[in-house]
Structure formats: structure tokens, C-alpha cells
Image (tube, coloured by chain):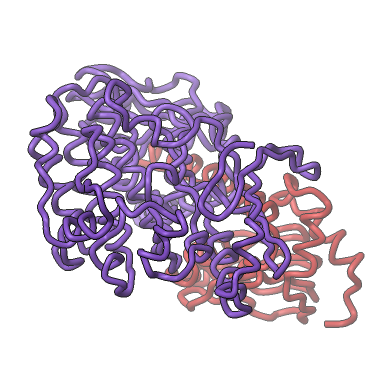
Chain colours: A red, B purple
Amino acid sequence: MTDISARDKFTALRKVDLLSRLNDAEIWELVRAGLWTRVPADTAVVREGEAGKSLFFLGSGNAKVTKEGKLLGSLTAGACFGEMAYIKAGEMPRSATVETLSEAVLAEFDAETLGETSLNCRLQLTTALLHAMVDRLAMANERLAKAPK
Amino acid sequence: MLGKGASGTVYLALDTFSGNDVALKVLDQSVVASPDFEATVTAQFMNEASLAGKLQHPHIASILEASVNRDSGYIALEYVPGGDLSQYVQPGKLLSPEQCIQVAFKSCGALDYAYRQGIVHRDIKPANIMVVSGTNIKVADFGAAFLKSGTDPQLQQDMGVGSPYYMSPEQVSGAELGHQSDMFSLGVVLYELFTGKRPFTADTLPELFRKILNEQPAPPSSLREGVSKEVDRILLQMMGKQPAERYPSWAELALDIAKIGRLSVYQQGIQDSDKFTALRKVPLLERLNDAEMWELVHAGRWTRIPSQTAVVKEGDPGKSLFFVASGQAKVTKGGRLLSLISTGETFGEMAYVKAGGMPRSATVESIADTVLAEFEPEMLQKVSMNCQLQLTAALLHAMVDRLATANERMTRAPQ
């Protein structure tokens, strides 16, 4: 979409916690590599069980995450979703549905578009995702350890 | 000046742009101005050199730059300070059989990599295998074979070009050269390295060629004490008269060489070939190429530990990542056995990723003699970015798989 300025895209990605370890040059690479879209409210971006291999950042707006109709959480600007299917490059179906609650700006990335970014940029993004996954795994392990056997 | 070769003079030069020492080979005027050196040859050479220039391998001396025209030509190569293998083929200066095995294994890996990029060396000889230090070698002069005048060995010898001692039967008879021709030549080099003697010698060139084509060399073990029958078997197979009698691939040869390295009775520490083959068996590392694997071989801390040694303890701080190169270990948490870890498996990933920000979540204790490769975040920051990216991506895949399993268990667990 032409109505999202490069400056807005940069600001949006710079606000993403997951990308805090990337320097400005690397963020600019992502600005150019991403597929940017503006979607209206009540749009399903990914659907549980469907195939998919892209990673999304919510540039602006809000979205909700549901699994089997049950609300799991909500996402605000700066949130990231779709990581697992992206990492497994389509081998793993989407584990939940993400639907916009308001008009939203989305940045979408897949392995091919990211393959064109610099080695540095890819290493930083991969490292950031690895940290996020380890944190999530530690949390899951903790919950499992506490769960009644 | 570093030396005078078949086609030019090699100088030690300073690359003023990068600040690195380079070996600058300046081609002789007679080579570039010779009638043989037509435009097509120039094009072929540039083509070959640019292919060879793409070779990035820990055991290959990189070509940094090459330029040839009718008046002059040069090739800038990575400078390797420790001389070449010809210093070790004199009696009294021979390397130990164990060191020879390591040189053999690394040369094989380099030639395998080059062959998979579509390059046959065509001029393997001791002077083309450079020494960094110890058994750390770099195969040099890829692509330079094009500078030798044609394939007529007689002509080459008349011009003082190349060394006929390392030629394969197919090279002697002017046939097409393939990776198994390099294998024959490497066989001759290794024979000389193990024994201090050349497998084929003669006073005249026709006599030498006759021997290369027809004669079986004496088994290396008959020429030097300490050389095993296994070495005989491998070297003689490398020097089979027909390419089909040699090993079909470098990988198969490398595997055979690694095996005798491991069985060696003199073995003290953990050999590089063992480290490399151990990491090759780690499923987590399967996406790494050979060059990246060698980086890990050198970056890691390798230890041999007895049975019943605790490697990491639950709750302790720690930041290293471990691979089990051989042996077996058990994983316990709160005294309860969680799983067994054996050869090729990985542990300590989470504490490694969080660089010490997360305590060890379980205890890992060896239950047999075990060889471990240990990596700390700081050690891995020194490897190439490509290698870091591949390893990080591999860990990321493993973590996502584990997270998916955990998520599934959570959905099934009573809320």
C-alpha cells in the first residue's frame, strides 16, 4: 500500500520489543523487505489449522487471538504473531486465529523476502526469535511442572 | 619473494586496502604472451579463477583476486605462513602417522567441497598443500592448473612445468580428468608423506609414465615402521589404475580415513577428524555446511570425561551448550530420571541462549566414558556470521519443536 510512509513503517518496527536488538540500519532493511498492508476491522489475518509460513508484526491497531473459539489474548501495536509457522516454513499449521479488532497496519515477512536482507539483519532477527521462543518454552515448562499430574 | 613456481613468481605482498598479507603470484611474461595463451584460454582461466575464488573453506587457501591479459597477469592468494607439505617428505622430517592421517582427512574435505562446487584441482602435489601450523593445512592453487600449457605431459616437463610424479594414469595418457584424478594425486602425496618415498620413481620420463600406468607401488607399511595395513589399503585404493578402482567419492574416502584415525593405538587427545565426524552426526547441526562445521570443531572446548561425572547441575548458573560426541549421559530433575542423552545429542541450549540469565533446568551426568564438545556464547561470537546464523536457526527450529510439544501437553493437561 502506498499510503503507509517509510517513516511510519520504520517507527512501527522500531517499537517492536522483539526487534529491540536490531540497529536502525537493520530495521530499515526490514522496512523494505516487508509486505505492508492496511486491513479493516474484523479481518482474519491467519486462521487456526491453516497452512502459512509468514511472520507478522502489528504496526498499528488491535487484534484478538482465539483458539477453538476461545479468546487467548489480544494484540496491540508492536506485537508479533505467526512466529512458529514462519520458523517451520509452513510445516506447522497456524496454531490460533488472529483477527483485527480495529483498522490495522500489518508488516508481513517470509523466508524468501527475509533471505534478501543482510546476514547481520537475519542473524539478529533469528537470535531475537530464539530468545522469545526460549522464554516461552521456559514458561510452558514451568506451567507443566506445576500442573496436576 | 616467497618462491618461484611453474608459471610465475610468488611474492609476499601487503594488501593496502585490507591490511592483510597476501601471496601475490605474478605470471611470467612468457606464460601470458605465449601463443597457447589465446583469448579462449584467458577466458577459461578467468572463469576457473572466479569459480575458485568463490571457494570458502577452512582448508582451502582463498583466491582473493585474479587478473590476466596479454601483457601481464597476477593472482592474489591468501597468505599461509607455515610453508608447504614438501618440508615433511624428507626422511628425518616425517610427520607421525597420526598427523599424516589428519592431513589426509582435511585435504579430502577441502577437495570434496571444491568438487561439489564443480572444481577439480588437477595439480595436487606437496607444494600445493600449505601448512598453517601443525596438521592445519590449506590446499592452494585451485584453478591455476589452467595456466599450465595444455594437457601434454611431455610438453609440461620440457617446459619445467608441473611435477610428473603426482600425475594420474589418465593424466599421463591425456584423458579427461575428474575428482578421482585428484584422488590419485593425493594418494601419491600421502604415500610420500607417510613414508618419505615416492611410489613411482624413474630416471626418465617415459619410464616414470610406464610405472604410473602399470606398476603397483610397494605397500607403505613395508617402508616405515608404525604405518598400518589399513593405511596401505586406503593409499593403494586411492592409487588404483582405473578411476573406478578408487573411492567413488571424497566423502567415502574421508570416512575411511577418519575410521583409521579413531582406531589408532597412539591416539592421545581427540583428533580433529573425530571432532568433525562427531559434529557431523549431530542432527541439530545438519544444516551447517563443512566449512561451518570446521569452525565449530575449532571453536569448541573438547573434553573426555569418565562415567558418573556431573556436567551441569540443576539450579546452577551456566551458559554453555553441549554436544555429546560419544558416550551417554542421563538427565535428572529433582532426582527423577527425565531421559538419556547419547551420541549426537545436544543439551544446555536454554541456558546458552539466555547467556547465563537462566539457571540449568536439570542435571546431566555421564553414565559412560563420554566425549563432549562445549560452546560458550563468547566462543561462538568469534565464528563467521554465516556459521552463527546457521547454528541460531538450528536452535530456533529445535526450540519451536519443543514448544509445540509443550503447548500440546498443556492443552491436554487438566486446567
Counting from the top left corner in percent of width and height, residue A128 is at 63, 48
* Count of numbered marks: 0
Q: Quadrant of residue B199?
A: top left
Quarter of the figure with the N terminus of chain B? top right
Q: Quadrant of residue B247?
A: bottom left
- Looking at the picture, tell me which residue is in the foreground, B208 or B341: B208
Counting from the top left corner in percent of width and height, residue A79 is at 70, 58
Q: Residue at x 87, y 82 (%)?
A: A2
User: Can you see residue B274?
Assistant: no
Q: Give above or below for B351 relative to B207.
A: above
- Looking at the picture, tell me which residue is in the foreground, B394 or B361: B394
In the image, taking residue B395 as reference, residue B181 lies left or right, namely left
Counting from the top left corner in percent of width and height, residue B375 is at 46, 31
In the image, taking residue A88 as reference, residue A54 lies left or right, namely right
Q: Residue at x 50, y 66 (%)?
A: B146
Q: Residue at x 68, y 65 (%)?
A: B68
User: Can you see residue A69?
Assistant: yes
Counting from the top left corner in percent of width and height, residue B248 is at 21, 64
Q: Give above or below for B235 relative to A89.
A: above
- Looking at the picture, tell me which residue is in the foreground, B343 or B186: B186
Q: Residue at x 32, y 68 (%)?
A: B178
In the image, taking residue B302 as reference, residue A62 lies left or right, namely right
Q: Give above or below for A8 relative to A18.
A: below
